[in-house]
Image (cartoon, rainbow, N blue to C red):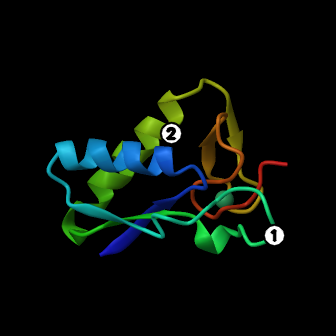
Amino acid sequence: MKKLYTHENRMIIFNLKNVLEDMGIECSVINEFASGGAGDLATFDTWPELWVADNDRFVEAESVLQKIVFDRNEDYWYCTGCQEKNGGAFEFCWKCGRSSE
Ligand SMILES: [Zn+2]
């Protein structure tokens, strides 16, 4: 089991989970009930995480993730931490979690 993605917006996590499960890729959400809302207690550590159960399909799941993230918006930005390409709708790097600011 490998962690695929984490995001403060659990709708994005569950949307992705649905897509992967439609493809027969088994996955589960951890920290499902984390608030992710305002307040000092909402940290990156409590964001919902999407884990892929089948390691053999992780690369496939990762490509689906990128497609979903990048097709969402035509604006891109590059992470200053890991140089990863990110969709404009995202405030944080999908790979390392660094802010786009
Ligand atoms: Zn990054």
Which dot marks residue 69? 2
Amino acid carrying mark 2 in the image: Val
Give the residue at the far right of this rendering.
Answer: 101
Left or right of 37 on screen, residue 17:
left
Q: Quadrant of residue 7?
A: bottom right
Give the residue at the far left of this rendering.
Answer: 24
**Residue 91 location in percent, x, y?**
72, 46
Label 1 and label 2: CA atoms lie apart by: 27 Å
Q: Closer to the camera: disc 1 or disc 2?
A: 1
N-terminal label among 1 and 2: 1
Q: Secondary structure at mark 1?
A: loop
Left or right of 83 on screen, residue 40:
right
Point 69% across, 56% down: residue: 37
Write down which quadrant ligand 1 falls in: bottom right
Left or right of 15 on screen, residue 33:
right
Q: Secondary structure at mark 2?
A: helix
Q: Which residue is mark 1?
A: 40
Q: Nearer the viewer, residue 31 or 56?
A: 31
Q: Are marks 1 and 2 in contact (CB under 8 Å)?
A: no
Amino acid carrying mark 1 in the image: Asp
Point 58% across, 54% down: residue: 94
Q: Is residue 79 above or below residue 41?
A: above
**Residue 66 location in percent, x, y?**
45, 44
